[in-house]
Amino acid sequence: MSGPTAAQTNLTNEETAAYTQAQQMTAQQYANQQAIYAPMTAQFQSIFAKGPNQQGYSPEELENLNSQAVEGTAENYQGAAKAVNEKLAAEGGGSNPLPSGADAQLQEQVATGAAGEESKEETGILSADYATGRSEYESAGQGLESIAAGLNPIGYENAETSAGGTANTEANAVAAEQDSWETAAIGAAGTIGAAATPKL
């Protein structure tokens, strides 16, 4: 008669220890990920909460870009106005003078063109600002999805449960071996006892 083998008993002990270790590692790993993901989650959530119609540039960036547009347009206007004035000065007098007011109209066209260019650049900056905000919103959403997948408490639970299930299966097998040995021993003792009892 025999109970569980030494190998079975050792295997049960090893699997139980592995299950305990899996529980500890799961708790530690989850805590480590929480420490990493918590600040990232807060940052993504703050961006995502603003919605898809948010602006992407900081106030400082926007002010800097608009200033560059104004300065660039002003420089271009000054250059164009200077060229027009020099052309008008060169053509003034002579046998075909410009009609009255034509030079003022030409100067006005330069000024209007400069104002239109500045407005166009500022509109482009604002459009790029909102496009950047939309892109940041989408990236924040993807970041939150990635974090949710990385945290995956169900995945941790499944790994731990699997280790526990394996340990439980082996423990049941050892218990069944133990029970069969004890049942066989009791049965044999009963048979011996019955044979030893004198018949009347």
Image: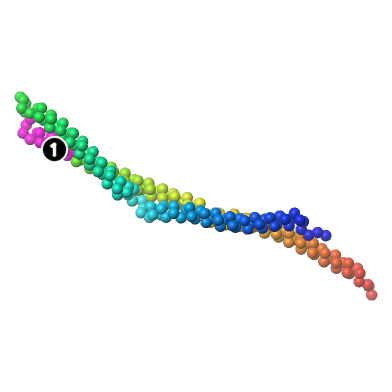
Residue hosting label 1: 108
Relative to residue 84, is residue 174 depicted above or below?
below
Q: Nearer the viewer, residue 49 or 17?
A: 17
Disc 1 marks which amino acid?
Answer: Glu
| Residue displayed at 60% across by 57% down | 23
Location of the C terminus (image quadrant): bottom right
Instruction: Say left or right for 79 vs 165.
Output: left
Q: Nearer the viewer, residue 1 or 77?
A: 77
Secondary structure beneath disc 1? helix
Q: Residues within 10 Å of mark 1 (few under 14, many from 20)?
A: few
Give how far across and how far down residue 12 sits, in percent. Answer: 70, 57
Q: Can residue 130 be seen by looking at this rendering?
A: no
Give how far across and how far down residue 130 sits, in percent. Answer: 32, 47
Relative to residue 114, is residue 146 depicted above or below?
below
| Residue displayed at 76% across by 62% down | 178
Name the colour scheme: rainbow
- Does the stretch in magenta take in 109? yes
Give how far across and how far down residue 138 sits, in percent. Answer: 40, 48
Q: Nearer the viewer, residue 140 or 83?
A: 83
Location of the N terminus (image quadrant): bottom right
Q: Quick one: which residue is furthest to the right in this view?
A: 200
| Residue displayed at 5% across by 25% down | 94
Q: Which residue range is magenta in the image?
A: 98-114
| Residue displayed at 73% across by 59% down | 174
Which image quadrant for residue 49? bottom left
Q: Can residue 80 be seen by looking at this rendering?
A: yes
- Does the stretch in magenta take in 85? no
